[in-house]
Amino acid sequence: MYDPTTWPTVGAFFEAIDRFLEASPLINGPVSIPLSAVLALLLLWGLLRLVRLRAASGEAQSVETAPDEDIQDAEITEETTGVMEPEPTAVHPEPKLEAVEAPAELVAEDQPSDEEIEAELEAVADEVFEEVLPEEIVVEPEPEPEPKPAPKLSLFARLRKGLTKTAGGLVGRIDQLVRGRKIDDEFFEELEEILFTADLGPTTAEKLLTHLQERVREENIEDAVMIRDILQEEIAKILRPHEAPLDVESSKPFIVMVVGVNGVGKTTTIGKIAKKFADEGKRVIFGAADTFRAAADEQLQVWADRAGAEIIKQKPGADPAAVAYDTVQAAVNREVDLAIIDTAGRLHTKHNLMEELKKIKRVMSKLDAAAPHEVLLVLDANTGQNAIQQAKSFHEALGLTGLILTKLDGTAKGGCIVGICDELEVPVRYIGIGEQMDDLRPFIADDFVQALFEAAKG
């Protein structure tokens, strides 16, 4: 219970209690409750007294100060020598300034916190930077230059670019043949191979070869390079009679029926034609007679919205001839300028499908004996010589009045247009050289031939 080193002041008190308790017979015997309470109170009083004495002892030790160093040295000298030295002359030493510690509460209040120090440093830094870098000389970052738009190509330049692949398959090979060659039988054999493999069609290729040989013989041409110019003239002669833009002024409403096999771009071509005439101030109406293909009327609706055209359509699977009839009737009643009937794509080899087209044409003629005023066949240039056979089949069934050749920009088989014009007496209304709205352009024979031969030069 008692540790003398910790509580030296009250040691005798606790020793007395220990002896009393050890000698008391109550330690091992029964103790009544009042006596236990008395002993507990005595112990509590002793502990309180002990705490007070300990606190008083600590205050007394803090008040005591050490004696002056000079006095201690003097006492030590007197004790060791036993002789009293004479008193020195009184010298008034300079008063010593003792450091007085401030109370802890005041120190804690005067000392700034870390946050206050950091805020003060930031304020000072801001003042310094404002003096060094005034607002007048602050340099703002320059904006990035806007990319320059690509220069817009002319119609002829776009045509020449679109015919690059076709030119490489025909004119480019001719250029390689005539370079440094003399005209002889071997030369004409190689020229024949080029013409027959250029998708001109065998009949047209044979005709061109015959005309070239005749002119070489008649004009006594020896320089093979001149074959290139002669070929350009002969192709232009074949194409010029088939140059005839679409004229819709002969009737109001002018009824156009558009046909073709699957995937040639009929609906897109219809939309571009409608936009062209709408920009000229014509009122246009569409007939969604392609009731077989899924979402065909939705696609046509998109183009109608772009061209500002009206559209006549029925539920999927409806009779295409009925849609065509309703469209012609609506065009007459609404006094529109142009009505374009979109039909389902069908193979030219399917007899029953071709008969359905004949029915559509007959039904329209019941409202107008001259309707349709134009039967347009859309051909994909990628089909090459097969496009010639398609044109023949549709012409026999419907009596075509115009051709549109699309996707010339993506194929080397564009020479098929020469064979089509040579074998069919049908004008070419438009050619497609790209996906943009104005990439469907009227066919002009001289521009086409010139662009074809210039594109081969790169």
Image: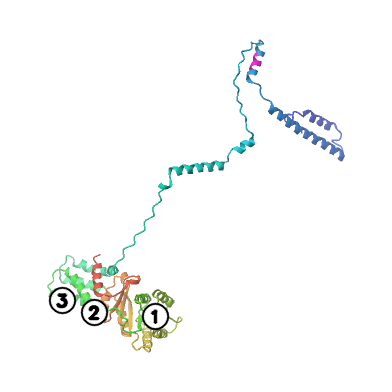
Q: Is residue 19 left or right of residue 230?
A: right
Between tags 1 and 3, which lies in front? 1
What residue does disc 1 label? 285
Front residue of 49/216: it is 49
- Whether residue 59 is in magenta: the answer is no
Q: Position of residue 304 (x, y in %)?
A: 40, 76
Q: Position of residue 58 (x, y in %)?
A: 71, 30
**Is residue 344 at least partly visible in the picture?**
no
- The quarter of the picture where the C terminus appears is bottom left
The secondary structure type at the circle numbered 3 is helix
The secondary structure type at the circle numbered 1 is strand
Picture quadrant of residue 171: bottom left
Q: Identity of the amino acid at label 1?
A: Ile
The secondary structure type at the circle numbered 2 is helix
Front residue of 351/17: it is 17
- Name the mark on residue 214: 3
Q: Is residue 449 left or right of residue 60?
A: left
Lower position in the chain sequence, tag 1 or tag 3: 3
Q: Position of residue 291 (x, y in %)?
A: 42, 81
Label 1 to label 3: alpha-carbon separation = 52 Å
Q: Can you name the residue that lies furthest to the front here?
A: 136
Picture quadrant of residue 386: bottom left
Q: Is residue 63 left or right of residue 305?
A: right
Label 2 Cα crowd, 10 Å radius (few <14 / some 14-19 / many 20+): some
Identify the residue at horizontal 68%, vertical 28% (top origin): 62
Examine the residues drawn in magenta and state their main secondary structure.
helix
Identify the residue at horizontal 31%, vertical 63% (top origin): 151
Q: Identity of the amino acid at label 3?
A: Glu
> Vertical placement of 447 versus 51: above or below?
below
Write down the region rendered in magenta: 73-77
